[in-house]
Image: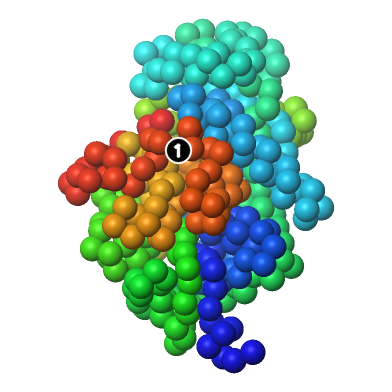
Amino acid sequence: MTDAARDEFDVIVVGLGALGSAAAYWASSRPGTRVLGLERFEVGHANGASADHSRIIRLSYHRPDYVRLAKRAYESWSIVEAEADEQIVTVTGGLDLWPADAAIPMSDYTDSLTAENVPYELLGAAEIQRRWPAWHLTDDVVGMYQAQGGIADPYRGNVAHRGLAIDQGAVLRAVAPVEALREVGDAYEVDAGGRTYSGGRVVITADAWTNDLLAQFDRRLPLTVTKEQVTYLAAPDPTLFAPDRFPVWIWMDDPSFYGFPVYGEAGPKVAEDAGGQPVTPDTRTFEPDAAIAERVRGFITDRLPAAGTKEIYTKTCLYTLTPERDLVIDRLPESPGVLVGLGAAHGFKYASVIGRILAELALDGATPSGGEIGAFRIDRPALLDRDAVARPLV
């Protein structure tokens, strides 16, 4: 085989974080499909959004299209788990909590679950505290418990996707930043890491670096990149937060907080959602934000005192937010052979199914999830307004 032939592929995936690793797996699962994955850093780096033990997976969402997509996400993860012989999803149950006059409407969630025939329970503060004594709630708090909520493991999920992709013949290249991307006839050329590759389709899953690649097509999305952080706490009694005794949870107000039972570290994990300051991927630091830490400590002291406030450690990551915080799953109208996937800082639960959909769009021109992704078009009004500002609450 000539050197040039080795650089010709059916699908080139740019960015091998959560979505890109998934796209590489699902595309390479098609027999005979030549797949290349390019990563600007080392594979598994901590510069982006998905380097940690846990992310929330849930059917509880504010719109029926998200609920339906979540159902297929669970199915997609189960396929990957079976193929990789690796547990990625741990079901703990999920608890959403609303204080009086919360900024996020509870009816959006209950209506969506009802519309999609997903069972749930509504619980008062006393019942929540009876089931999970770690909580300390005022009487005005109402909870919604959905039994299928739980943890999706990014470390395991990303490694499984990439490993399976390689087993299926995909070529994954690290430290290969893209210098140029251009349309050549009915194909594309990608200059990366000192080499030029040719591909029939290109899948962009570059998260905070998305606009750097879209600039090749004179398109820029109004994305807001923020530096966020999560904290693992040394709970005095970690057994209260065991995965079989304590659910993942979200505080549905502004500010919004969320957390996990003990998983991956010796204590529970808590964080504020979208509380960080705007940054760029190139100038961000990895230092924790003291203001976020103070807000988290205040919430834990008031609402979840059994978690304690002694830190095991805090780590930072990037959020890449669209204006209305909807996902992006679409082809470029001006260059239909280019597909774009963006998780909008709540996408890991959907990572496998987003990669699956991108592969379907690239190879089949359509997807069984067509009814779920209409709101995630790249040319929707919110993404055509270059001055739009992110609204973080969902």
Side of 186 where 16 appears, left or right: right
Residue 79 showing in the rendered view: yes
Quadrant location, the N terminus: bottom right
- The residue wearing badge 1 is 373
103 in relation to 58, above or below: above
Name the residue: 62% across, 32% down: 71
Q: Point out the residue furthest to the bottom here.
A: 2
302 in relation to 202, above or below: above
Quadrant in the rendering for residue 33: bottom right
Q: Tag 1: Cα neighbours inside 10 Å, few (<14), some, or many (≥20)?
A: some
Task: Give the amino acid at mark 1.
Answer: Ile
User: Closest to the observer: 324 or 276?
Assistant: 324
Residue 277 showing in the rendered view: no
182 in relation to 231, above or below: below
Quadrant location, the C terminus: top left
Where residue 70 appears, as percent x and y from the top left, is 58, 34
Name the residue: 53% across, 38% down: 369
Question: How are the colours assigned in the image?
Answer: rainbow
Name the residue: 72% across, 38% down: 90
Where residue 365 appears, as percent x and y from the top left, is 49, 51
Where residue 301 appears, as percent x and y from the top left, is 52, 29
20 in relation to 226, above or below: below
Name the residue: 69% across, 54% down: 156
User: Closest to the observer: 180 or 320?
Assistant: 180
Q: Point out the residue furthest to the right here.
A: 85
Quadrant in the rendering for residue 174: bottom right
Circle 1 SS class: loop
| Mark count | 1
Where residue 326 appears, as percent x and y from the top left, is 39, 38
